[in-house]
Image (tube, rainbow, N blue to C red):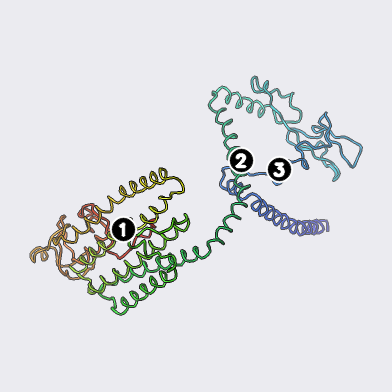
């Protein structure tokens, strides 16, 4: 009977404690969410381990570090009774109570051991600590403290510098949290003032990324490409470019395409928008030209595939050269502002043109290298293989695992189909079998039909 009653009591206790545990976890989650909303930067730094986790109740006037009901003698006054309990009474060396049975109204106290300078220098006396750890543990702790002191000042300096660094990081995080709401409010107002520009920029950028993906897929199809599909994409791209320029016909964006500066000095954000739209639309128009190249080299095998890759590369490097010149008229008019004085405007305009000329030199060199590669008829990574060489190699391409078509002998003496190895060298520079460097490091190839997605803003 006693056993059954004890089991019933334990089950009631566990069942009553489980809701409290669930409530505690929910309260902890609510406190964590509230803390993140109040100070998001500090919470992220704490989660990353840069800052220490703060307690749920930080120090404030409402929650002092020292309780108000503690007197000078270290005694805590019990508000429910007139008796005062010493913090060190009733606690043995292991933290247990003197009373073996202890009633439910008994107060448990925890002793705190404070090691002073004397304890660091000469060890800790077992009798000086009342109700603390044992003599051996105290002596070991004191020896460790002495070892830290004797180890030099480097460790102390690191320990002293670390709190200061954490304090600086915490102050920066609090400063960011203070200006973050106002900054977000300004961002919302800025987006509202330029809402149409943001919508247009996001729209044309999304269309550009999708068009680039379509063009790469059509290039990879090789002989399976359909002419009517290529024509359909070309018409859609042309309509898209026409609609964008017609929608902004009053702003006359197309003047910059002809390298004509705007008549009036554009504001900064308006200049950025003009350059962004023109840069995106020029790449869209270049994709139409690349679709025409894919129509011309429809079969895409052997020699035609290699020439197709060279043509696509030439189109892309021509586009890069033109895009580098495209922002120049807008920024030239922006910097040539007489309101700031003729000397200042002339100086800023001259500096911009100087920087622009230095950046264009590389684009010009790449353009001429692409033209030279297109005019080169021989294969710069090998030569056409003879029948004897093909028979000796087995007349089986290691890439497509089929009979070789227009075989090419690489410099490392391995033989592959021309279309297979040409497609391979669009991405790699080494032999597919022995990994020997076969293709010299020259221009980056855009034979896969891709277009550079980085914006040319300056």
Q: Pick out the residue farthest to the bottom.
A: 228
> Sequence order check: which comes first, mark 2 or mark 3?
3
Question: Mark on residue 287?
Answer: none
Q: Is residue 70 above or below residue 16?
A: above
Query: Would residue 209 appear left or right of 2 to someone viewing this image?
Result: left
Residue 458 appears in the rendering: no
Residue receiving disc 1: 320
Q: Helix or strand or loop: what does disc 3 sit on?
A: loop
Picture coordinates of residue 127 (x, y %)?
A: 74, 23
Q: CA distance from mark 2 to mark 3?
A: 16 Å
Q: Of 188 and 370, which appears nearest the observer?
A: 188
Residue receiving disc 3: 58
Residue 350 appears in the rendering: yes
Q: Which quadrant would residue 64 be assigned to in this image?
A: top right
Q: Is residue 400 above or below residue 414?
A: below
Picture coordinates of residue 294 (x, y %)?
A: 26, 71
Residue receiving disc 2: 171
For image coordinates 27% across by 60% down, the residue present is 318
For image coordinates 58% across by 23% down, the residue present is 149
Picture coordinates of residue 21 (x, y %)?
A: 72, 55
């Amino acid at each position: 009977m006693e056993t059954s009653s004890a089991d019933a009591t334990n089950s009631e206790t566990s069942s009553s404690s489980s809701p409290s545990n669930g409530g505690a976890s929910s309260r902890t989650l609510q406190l964590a969410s509230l803390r993140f909303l109040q100070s998001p930067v500090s919470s992220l730094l704490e989660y990353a381990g840069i800052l220490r986790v703060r307690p749920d109740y930080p120090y404030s006037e409402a929650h002092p570090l020292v309780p108000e009901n503690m007197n000078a003698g270290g005694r805590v006054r019990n508000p429910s009774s007139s008796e005062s309990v010493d913090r060190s009474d009733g606690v043995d060396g292991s933290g247990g109570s003197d009373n073996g049975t202890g009633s439910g109204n008994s107060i448990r106290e925890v002793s705190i051991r404070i090691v002073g300078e004397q304890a660091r220098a000469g060890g800790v006396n077992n009798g000086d600590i009342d109700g603390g750890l044992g003599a051996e543990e105290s002596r070991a702790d004191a020896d460790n403290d002495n070892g830290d002191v004797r180890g030099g000042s480097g460790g102390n300096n690191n320990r002293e510098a670390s709190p200061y660094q954490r304090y600086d990081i915490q102050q920066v995080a609090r400063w960011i949290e203070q200006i973050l709401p106002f900054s977000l409010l300004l961002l919302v107002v800025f987006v509202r003032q330029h809402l149409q520009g943001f919508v247009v920029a996001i729209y044309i950028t999304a269309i550009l990324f999708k068009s680039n993906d379509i063009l790469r897929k059509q290039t990879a199809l090789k002989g399976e490409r359909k002419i009517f599909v290529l024509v359909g994409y070309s018409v859609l791209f042309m309509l898209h470019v026409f609609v964008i320029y017609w929608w902004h016909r009053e702003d006359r964006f197309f003047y910059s395409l002809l390298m004509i500066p705007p008549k009036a000095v554009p504001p900064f954000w308006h200049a950025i928008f003009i350059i962004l739209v023109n840069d995106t639309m020029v790449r869209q128009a270049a994709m139409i030209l690349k679709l025409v190249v894919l129509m011309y080299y429809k079969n895409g095998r052997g020699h035609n595939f290699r020439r197709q890759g060279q043509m696509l590369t030439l189109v892309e490097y021509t586009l890069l050269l033109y895009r580098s010149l495209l922002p120049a008229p807008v920024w030239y008019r922006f910097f040539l502002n007489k309101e700031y004085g003729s000397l200042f405007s002339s100086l800023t305009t001259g500096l911009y043109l100087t920087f622009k000329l230095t950046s264009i030199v590389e684009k010009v060199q790449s353009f001429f290298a692409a033209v030279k590669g297109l005019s080169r008829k021989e294969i710069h990574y090998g030569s056409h293989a003879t029948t004897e060489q093909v028979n000796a190699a087995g007349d089986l391409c290691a890439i497509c695992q089929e009979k070789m078509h227009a075989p090419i002998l690489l410099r490392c003496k391995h033989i592959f189909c021309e279309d297979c190895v040409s497609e391979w060298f669009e991405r790699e520079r080494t032999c597919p079998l022995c990994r020997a460097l076969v293709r010299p490091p020259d221009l980056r190839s855009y034979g896969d039909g891709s277009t550079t997605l980085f914006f040319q803003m300056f």
